């Protein structure tokens, strides 16, 4: 049973690596960004509420996110492990997750922190060109990351969960390092 959190700035490769790792080890890849983008494309109430925040590069309010994660983690496929990508995104979300997991007798095994320079991030995201991938919004997402998400590095470091990985390498090299961490977990 493996439970992982992928942490890192926008464009650090969380989604790319999460897809590879969850495919290799057969546990679900739970991406709050993907869940929100699907809600936006389906025009649901959640999607309508979330869209303006996402377009600006701001975090969607916690009250829209926490219940989604709670429900997703209670689905049958998450009983034997999971990989969270893009959640938690601030200390409030991390504290919520910790008490949610405590309540069901679980905890996360490792928080994998992908480190990538701002220059590589801007280059990668401009090349991808998602709706929130223009230079102004990318810079804002980086600022939001530094202010709200980066404090989670200390949060998880103090709980001896954090492993930092250099994400400024080829996809394959980063995957290799991540797999070494996953394989080192004795389950
Ligand atoms: P989210 O979807 O989580 O976006 P993000 O964190 O900004 O991350 P990205 O998807 O841009 O990057 P990534 O690290 O996954 O990198 P990727 O693998 O895609 O969130 C979007 C929005 O939703 C947020 O702004 C917020 O509004 C909202 N939201 C989501 N979760 C939330 C939460 N918990 N609370 C509140 N709001 C929330 O790679 C990026 C590009 O780089 C790709 O083109 C890829 O092919 C390329 N690439 C990947 N790895 C490499 C490599 N090693 N070398 C070269 N290129 C690479």
Image (cartoon, grey):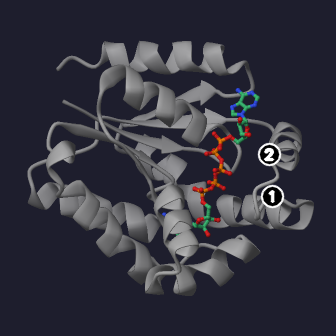
Residue occupying the point 57% across, 70% down: 41
Residue occupying the point 29% across, 34% down: 27
Residue occupying the point 46% across, 81% down: 44
71 or 153, which is in the foreground? 71
- Please determine whether, in this image, residue 88 is positioned above or below residue 6: below
The residue that disc 2 covers is 128
183 or 128, which is in the foreground? 128
The residue that disc 1 covers is 133
Q: Is residue 120 left or right of residue 12?
A: right
Image spot of residue 171 (x, y percent): 66, 21
Dot placed on the residue nearer the N-terminal end, 1 or 2: 2
Q: Is mark 1 within 8 Å of ligand 1?
A: yes
Question: Based on the displayed image, in which of its 4 quarters is residue 143 positioned?
Answer: bottom right
- Please determine whether, in this image, residue 35 is positioned above or below residue 187: below
Q: Residues within 10 Å of mark 2 (few under 14, many from 20)?
A: few
**Dots 1 and 2: beta carbons under 8 Å?**
yes
- The C terminus is located in which quarter? top left
- Please determine whether, in this image, residue 148 is positioned above or below residue 129: below
Q: Is mark 2 within 8 Å of ligand 1?
A: yes
Image spot of residue 185 (x, y percent): 28, 19
Q: Is residue 151 left or right of residue 171?
A: left
Image spot of residue 182 (x, y percent): 36, 21
Question: Based on the displayed image, in which of its 4 quarters is residue 70 positioned?
Answer: bottom left
Residue occupying the point 33% across, 14% down: 184
Q: Secondary structure at mark 1?
A: loop
């Amino acid at each position: 049973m493996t439970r992982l959190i992928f942490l890192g700035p926008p464009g650090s490769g969380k989604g790319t690596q999460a897809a590879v790792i969850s495919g290799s080890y057969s546990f679900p890849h739970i991406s709050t960004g993907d869940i929100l983008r699907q809600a936006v494309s389906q025009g649901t109430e959640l999607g309508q509420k979330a869209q303006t925040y996402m377009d600006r590069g701001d975090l969607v309010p916690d009250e829209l996110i926490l219940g989604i994660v709670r429900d997703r983690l209670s689905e049958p496929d998450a009983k034997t492990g999971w990989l969270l990508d893009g959640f938690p995104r601030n200390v409030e979300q991390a504290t919520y997750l910790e008490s949610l997991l405590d309540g069901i007798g679980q905890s996360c095994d490792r928080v994998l922190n992908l480190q990538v320079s701002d220059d590589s991030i801007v280059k990668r995201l401009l090349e991808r060109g998602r709706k929130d991938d223009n230079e102004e919004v990318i810079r804002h997402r980086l600022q939001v990351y530094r202010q709200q998400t980066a404090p989670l590095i200390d949060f998880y470091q103090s709980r001896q969960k954090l492993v930092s990985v250099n994400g400024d390498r080829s996809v394959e090299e980063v995957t290799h390092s991540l797999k070494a961490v996953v394989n080192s977990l004795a389950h």
